[in-house]
Image (cartoon, helix red, strand yellow):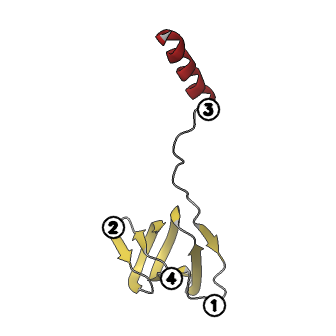
Amino acid sequence: MKRLLKGLLVLAMGTGLLVGFPAAAHAINSTPCGGRSDFFKVVNYDNNIRNEHCFANAGNMSVYITNVTLVCSGNNAAVADFGQGFSAFNKWQCQSYSRWTLIYIHIL
């Protein structure tokens, strides 16, 4: 009997019938800034042209944004990974950088 139950459990796991806890949502997405200040905003310069990249919703995202000069958290607590170091942000906090490369964003 134990062998039968064990076999059914392995079969259920293999076919996805056994449901566990859901994985953490990775709902962060890029969105137009539209003059809003509540998004997580990254400012960079490409050929001396200022660009703004905005992100909304909690989650994680790998990015590759070079020449970053400013990051503002908006209405978000967040962590930014620049490869050469991490920056943690509380809500409504900005930090200047000297053209660093941003590689990962985690919005809480």
Tell me the distance, in whole angstroms, between the alpha carbons under discs 2 and 3. 40 Å
Residue 2: % across, % down: 47, 12
Q: Quick one: label 2, few (<14), some, or many (20+) residues within 10 Å?
A: few
Per the image, the residue denoted by label 2 is 84
Please tell me which residue is depicted at 48% across the width and 78% down the height of the picture.
76
90 left or right of 45?
left
Residue occupying the point 58% across, 78% down: 53
The first of marks 4 and 2 along the sequence is: 4
Mark 3 and mark 1 in contact? Answer it, CB < 8 Å. no
Q: CA distance from mark 4 to mark 3?
A: 38 Å
44 vs 41, nearest the viewer: 41
Tell me the amino acid under the disc marked 4: Asn
Q: Residue at x 54, y 22 (%)?
A: 9
Tell me residue 11's x, y (percent). 59, 21
Mark pair 3, 1: CA separation: 45 Å
- Give the CA separation, mark 4 to mark 2: 25 Å
Disc 3 marks which residue? 16
Q: Which residue is mark 4?
A: 75
Q: Amino acid at mark 3?
A: Gly
Query: Mark 1 highlights which residue?
Result: 35
Q: Upstream in the sequence, badge 2 or badge 3?
A: 3
Q: Residue extending furthest left? A: 85
